[in-house]
Image: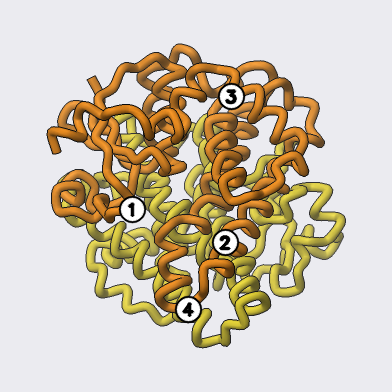
Chain colours: A orange, B yellow
Amino acid sequence: MVTLHHFYRSSASFRVRIALNLKKISYEQIVHDLDAGAQRSPAYLSVNPQGLLPALAVGRDVLTQSAAILEFLESTYPDPPLLPATPMEQARVRALFHIVAADTHPITTMRVARYLKTVLGCDEPTIQHWKQHWLIDGLTALEDVLASDPATGRFCHGDRVSLADVALVPQVVSALKLGVIVEAFPTVARIHEHCMQMDAFRDAHPDACQFQQPVQAIKE
Amino acid sequence: MVTLHHFYRSSASFRVRIALNLKKISYEQIVHDLDAGAQRSPAYLSVNPQGLLPALAVGRDVLTQSAAILEFLESTYPDPPLLPATPMEQARVRALFHIVAADTHPITTMRVARYLKTVLGCDEPTIQHWKQHWLIDGLTALEDVLASDPATGRFCHGDRVSLADVALVPQVVSALKLGVIVEAFPTVARIHEHCMQMDAFRDAHPDACQFQQPVQAIKE
């Protein structure tokens, strides 16, 4: 049994929830309320000294960083595979993943927004514009790569779900929440819609988690 | 033969240069001058529509995103391995890699600095402080994880070089350039020094590349 430390609205946690669902791995969960700063509590810092979500406890080991967790799940629960067969195809999927996970998401996180507000004195509309700018930048890059490559299918890579979709969907959900017109990125929008027809994606969505009563959260 | 599109000062390019050197893969190079905005030239955008460095051309395929390129090299040139043997150890190495490649580096890039300057009107000292803040944040996270775990050895993971070191060294070099006191992070500083005794790291350093005359650059 594995235990996921997460928060419904954390985009990187959303990625891991999708992969756990796709691979039908049952997991316990401990919810850390980012709004209340729970990820900085001494209890959680003893789990993950970096104080970031998600973390996945596997026995006595704790895995951090969504990309590292997802690769671990891919190695240890290979069915269904979330990476294609050849190194070259894998490189394409991982590149799409990192357009989101490296080039886009980190610039739009709460800790960056906090710096903009407290150190640079930015007001709320300026911070919203910041987030929208980088989300649009990231979705533009995804669209360019996806729309120009015949390797794109119903999903980001052909007709099988992969780690690229696992990254794309949470990023689109964040963009929608910030009022970005996702239809301006037609390939991205189409893949998002296609993924959201699957239970694994729907059940991992922040709105689905928000109304669950997390068993482990009570024990905390 | 593979061809690396890079720039001496690009931190993500530096990672790929180190790995190519460690695995003794000979490569041609095409240098794109970031200072002159060459990565946004139509010629390069036809190679990598995202206009970011590095990219690795392998035959007719072009790989982008340093993490994806490094995993590709690991699959196709497994000797010497830059990932440890077990999925759990691999997760530790990849997590360390992403503390740099996802949580730190993307927030300090030129494109973010450009937004701070042109949209938010930040002056040069404010931008320097921004970069220092996030570099210190990242080095603090690395130090916490490395110093508290007996799995850390002469390198980030035991006594063999890994992808974690490949990410750590360029980040430390960026921090030094920005005047960050790296000695405040003793484990990080020690590993950086140890790596820099190896030719593969030294030859990939921006200062070493800067004085090379790149053959392919002339053809551009």
Per the image, label 3 sits on a secondary structure element best described as loop
The residue to which callout 2 is attached is: A128
Q: Residues within 10 Å of mark 3 (few under 14, many from 20)?
A: some
Res A35 label: 1
Image quarter hosting the C terminus of chain B: bottom right
Kindly check if marks 2 and 3 are in contact, taking CB atoms under 8 A apart as contact.
no
Which badge, 4 or 2, comes first in the chain's sequence?
A: 4
The residue to which callout 3 is attached is: A196
Name the residue at 26% across, 60% down.
B143
Q: CA distance from mark 1 to mark 2?
A: 17 Å
Which badge, 4 or 1, comes first in the chain's sequence?
A: 1
Task: Tell me: A45 left or right of B73.
Answer: left
Three-letter residue code for mark 3: Met
Per the image, label 4 sits on a secondary structure element best described as loop
Q: Residues within 10 Å of mark 4 (few under 14, many from 20)?
A: some
Q: CA distance from mark 4 to mark 1?
A: 21 Å
Query: Above or below — where is A124 with respect to A73?
Result: below
**Where residue B97 sits in the image (x, y, percent)?**
41, 48
Three-letter residue code for mark 4: Leu
Which badge, 1 or 3, comes first in the chain's sequence?
A: 1
Which badge, 4 or 3, comes first in the chain's sequence?
A: 4
Per the image, label 1 sits on a secondary structure element best described as helix
